[in-house]
Image (cartoon, grey):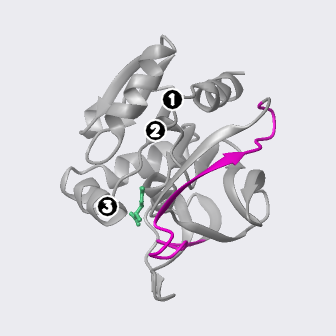
Amino acid sequence: MKAGVLALQGSFREHREVLDALGVEVIEVRTPQALSGLDVLFLPGGESTTITKLLRTSGLVEPLQRALDEGLPVFGTCAGLIVLADDLRDQHGANAPAVFGVLGCTVLRNGYGTQLDSFEAALRIDGIEGTFPGVFIRAPLIESTGPGVEVLAAHDGAPVLVRQGRVWAATFHPELSGDLRLHQRFLQEVAA
Ligand code: GLN
């Protein structure tokens, strides 16, 4: 199993640490060449506008779009979810252009508001025993999900972990939680 981690900006080192702890071979993706031979890809949290700009300047948008369209399993966390979604709103509710558009969700950037910028919540996740520590940092809010999108966890009535086939996405940061189980579960399911 060879796992790529998009390493342009944001919490890519933390994803790498989780994967290292799970004994998975990790490739940091900064160029189109680094995409070849990957079995899965993680898109980290960070600043989605910065990540989007860097995706463009590094020539990654088209090859990555192709890989996703061809079924490369992907797990996007926070800003990573934002670049996967097909319907984006900025914090004022205005439409913003989708980047990869492979996840059928309407997503409001910074949707939990400024006063609630960051919080932690114990999440119940389908298929994971007990609770999982959800770390939310200027998190996007999933306002609605399209057909084919399964909600694996919700918080305060909103989906926070979703899956559409081989596309997984969380509005929180499993890579910052110290808990390896969600990465492990994703890897097990997409490898199966
Ligand atoms: N608010 C950030 C954005 O819109 C995402 C925050 C995060 O990844 N922690 O890009």
Q: Which residue is nearer to you in this view: 12 or 39?
A: 12
The residue range painted magenta reads 107-128
Give how far across and how far down residue 42 sits, in percent.
46, 38
Give how far across and how far down residue 133 sits, in percent.
62, 40
- Density class for disc 1 (Cα within 10 Å; few <14, some 14-19, many ≥20) is few
Q: Which mark is residue 178?
A: 1
Q: Is mark 2 within 8 Å of ligand 1?
A: no
Please determine whether, in this image, residue 25 is positioned above or below residue 132. above
Q: Is residue 36 magenta?
A: no
Whether residue 35 can be seen here:
no
Mark closer to the chain start, 3 or 2: 3
Query: Marks 1/2: CA distance?
Result: 6 Å
Residue at 46%, 81% in the rendered image: 91
> What kind of element bears circle 3?
helix
Residue at 44%, 64% in the rendered image: 138
Q: Amino acid at mark 3?
A: Thr
Q: Quadrant of the C terminus?
A: top right
Q: Which mark is residue 52?
A: 3
Q: Residue furthest left?
A: 57
From the image, tell me which residue sits under label 2. 176
**Marks 1,2: beta carbons within 8 A:** yes
Give how far across and how far down residue 180 sits, in percent.
57, 25
